[in-house]
């Protein structure tokens, strides 16, 4: 938490224990057929641009996806800690699974839309077994001085950053790349799935 307030981002390895990891990986494979092409922008602005963003997503629903309760509880705890120690006033979240097929990438962007600004903390948890150097798909994080560094999407690693302040990109992945991505919100939203 301190790291996030100081640097605007934090990287936590082994964020998921093996039980949560297995649950999520099995859930992911079970639903892979139902993923849809992700878009950019909110509501009327929503467009699908493969040149900007190449992933497929599957929006989660806490009630429907109760198999993931152990994950939801972990997210609840994380949100509670942010509220308690950083006074962020977070009151909800939205999460989707993301699949970048071979060659998929996401250009440099911020996780806020012009007409919607309640995404406060971005959370990405990687589910890639045996990810190796050369597999691509790194998350590039840009700092305030415009320098950047790469984060490899290794299994069980979690990256969190301030949605409105940290530009980031996903480099082309040379293998299918799997993650759970979400946003801790300052106002709850049931509409995430319409936003891409
Ligand atoms: O998967 C990642 O590393 C980041 C994904 C991302 O930037 C997004 O979905 O907005
Ligand atoms: Fe993003």
Image (spheres, helix red, strand yellow):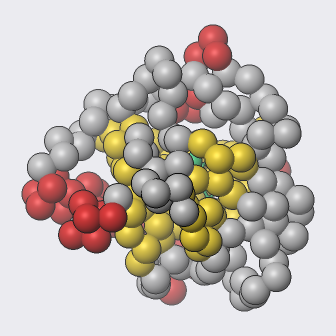
Q: Is residue 61 visible?
A: no
Is 185 displayed left or right of 94 in the figure?
A: left
Can you give x and y, in whole percent of width and height, for residue 58 in the image? 66, 46
Can you give x and y, in whole percent of width and height, for residue 72 in the image? 38, 58
Q: Looking at this view, name the residue that lies furthest to the front.
A: 145
Can you give x and y, in whole percent of width and height, for residue 70 in the image? 39, 67
Q: Is residue 50 visible?
A: yes
Above or below, comparing residue 107 to residue 188 in the picture: below
Assign the C terminus to one quadrant of the image: top right
Q: Residue at x 64, y 76 (%)?
A: 152
Q: Looking at this view, name the residue that lies furthest to the top.
A: 44
Q: Nearer the viewer, residue 57 or 151?
A: 151
Is 67 displayed left or right of 108 in the figure?
A: left
Can you give x and y, in whole percent of width and height, for residue 82 in the image? 21, 57
Q: Quadrant of residue 131?
A: bottom right
Assign the N terminus to one quadrant of the image: bottom left
Q: Residue at x 44, y 23 (%)?
A: 116
Q: Nearer the viewer, residue 126 or 59?
A: 126
Is 70 displayed left or right of 57 in the figure?
A: left
Q: Residue at x 24, y 40 (%)?
A: 91
Above or below, comparing residue 95 to residue 17 in the picture: above
Above or below, comparing residue 110 to residue 145 in the picture: above
């Amino acid at each position: 938490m301190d790291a996030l307030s100081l640097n605007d981002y934090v990287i936590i390895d082994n964020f998921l224990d093996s039980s949560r990891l297995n649950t999520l990986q099995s859930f992911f494979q079970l639903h892979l057929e139902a993923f849809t092409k992700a878009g950019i922008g909110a509501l009327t602005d929503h467009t699908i641009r493969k040149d900007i963003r190449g992933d497929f997503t599957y929006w989660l629903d806490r009630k429907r996806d109760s198999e993931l309760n152990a994950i939801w509880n972990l997210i609840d705890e994380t949100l509670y800690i942010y509220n308690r120690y950083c006074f962020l006033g977070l009151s909800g979240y939205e999460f989707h699974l993301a699949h970048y097929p071979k060659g998929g990438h996401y250009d440099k962007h911020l996780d806020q839309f012009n007409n919607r600004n309640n995404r406060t903390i971005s959370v990405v948890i990687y589910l890639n077994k045996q990810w190796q150097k050369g597999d691509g798909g790194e998350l590039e994080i840009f700092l305030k001085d415009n320098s950047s560094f790469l984060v490899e999407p290794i299994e069980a690693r979690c990256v969190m950053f301030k949605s409105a302040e940290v530009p980031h990109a996903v480099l082309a992945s040379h293998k299918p790349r799997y993650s759970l991505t979400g946003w801790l919100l300052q106002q709850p939203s049931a509409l995430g799935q319409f936003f891409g």
